Image (cartoon, rainbow, N blue to C red):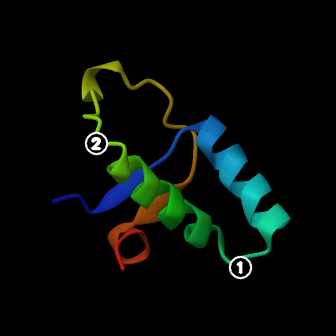
Amino acid sequence: MFTQVKTSKENKDIVVQLSRKLNLGAENVIARIAFTYSLSLDRKLDLNHLSDFGGKEYSRSVSVW
């Protein structure tokens, strides 16, 4: 089980923009929606090809509700 989730720089920028535009409060609200959506796509993540970790880091307590 994971303890932290770290996003890409591109993802961080999108989350910030959507949080401001939709006015849903904290950025982790949009991040939770995105995380749930990604799970619904039923695609496996290939950890061997990840290269951008310059985004925001979310702890497990924020990432999992």
x then y, percent, for residue 16? 73, 56
Where is mark 2, residue-wise? 42
Which of pointers 2 and 1 lies earlier in the amino acid sequence? 1
> Of tags 2 and 1, which is closer to the observer?
2
Q: Is residue 8 placed above or below 30 in the rendered structure? A: above
Q: In which quarter of the image is the C terminus?
A: bottom left
Which residue is at the front of the view, 42 or 11?
42
**Residue furthest top as drawn:** 49
Residue at 54% across, 38% down: 8
Q: What residue type is labelled 1?
A: Gly
Q: Among all residues in the image, which is located at the extreme right?
A: 21
Label 1: which secondary element = loop
Q: Which of the 4 quarters of the picture holds residue 61?
A: bottom left
| 51 versus 14 height, above or below | above
Task: Please give the residue where the numbered disc 1 appears in the rendered image.
Answer: 25
- Callout 1 crowding tier (Cα within 10 Å): few <14, some 14–19, many ≥20: few
In the rendered view, tell whether residue 50 sits above or below residue 41.
above
Which label sits on residue 55? none
- Element assignment for label 2: loop
Depth check: 34 or 42 in front?
A: 42
Residue 32 % position (x, y): 48, 66
